[in-house]
Image (tube, rainbow, N blue to C red):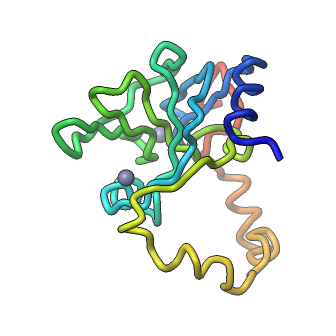
Amino acid sequence: MASVRQLLKVFNRMHDPMYGGCQCGNIRFVAHSLLDNPHVCHCRMCQKAVGNFFAALVGVPLKDFAWTRGTPATFKSSALVERGFCADCGTPLFFKHAENKHISITMGAFDRPEVIPLEFQLGMEGRLPQIDQLAHVKDDGTTEEADAEGTPGIKTSNRQHPDHETTVWPE
Ligand SMILES: [Zn+2]
Ligand SMILES: [Zn+2]
């Protein structure tokens, strides 16, 4: 099996820009390459920052990264670290260490998070027991099956930005 390093090398060589943004679409970004460090951080600060079990992040060299729509709001979670999010919808978007020449983007904010392979995990002292429970909890089916009545109403009034670039938004 190809390693993450090999996969990302191929990806970066293909030079297909990776787009992404927040849920409401007021913030959009483009990444022209990715570092070979896609990871999840289990530390308690990352849990709080994303309101979840862990933060999934991948580094993008600053020279290869741009905000293409809007500017994220920021919170300095410590002297050296700034975390960014959309002030309108709250989507967590980045982690930036002052001394790094890269910005770490939340993987779920990419339009195609499924193509970014994971390389490692860290912050193990904060790793929550739910991560292991996930492999064993009952499979309740897809949302569309489980909530067949509610889903159409959500679909027709969905204000989430689609997983591709838009020239005009909201439509
Ligand atoms: Zn937003
Ligand atoms: Zn962390």
Where does the image place residue 105, in percent across and percent down from the top left?
A: 49, 37
Q: Is residue 128 above or below residue 35?
A: below
Q: Nearer the viewer, residue 118 or 155?
A: 118
Residue at image point 36% right, 40% down: 87
Q: Residue at x 62, y 19 (%)?
A: 32
Q: Horizontal and vertical percent for residue 131?
A: 55, 73
Left or right position of 151 against 36? right
| Farthest residue, direction left | 79
In the picture, residue 110 is in which quadrant? top right
- In this picture, is 123 found above or below 25? below
* Vertical order, 145 against 17 (above or below): below
| 2 left or right, relative to 138 | right
Residue at 74% in and 18% down: 13
- Count up the numbered dots: 0
Q: Is residue 112 above or below residue 42?
A: above
Foreground pick, 120 / 14: 120
Q: How far from the left and from the top, in percent, is residue 129?
A: 48, 79
Which residue shows up at 74% across the image and 70% down it? 143
Horizontally, residue 88 falls left or right of residue 68, namely left
Q: Report the residue that reaches farthest toward the top.
A: 63
Q: Nearer the viewer, residue 145 or 83?
A: 83
User: Where in the figure is residue 81, as x and y percent of width and height?
Assistant: 26, 38
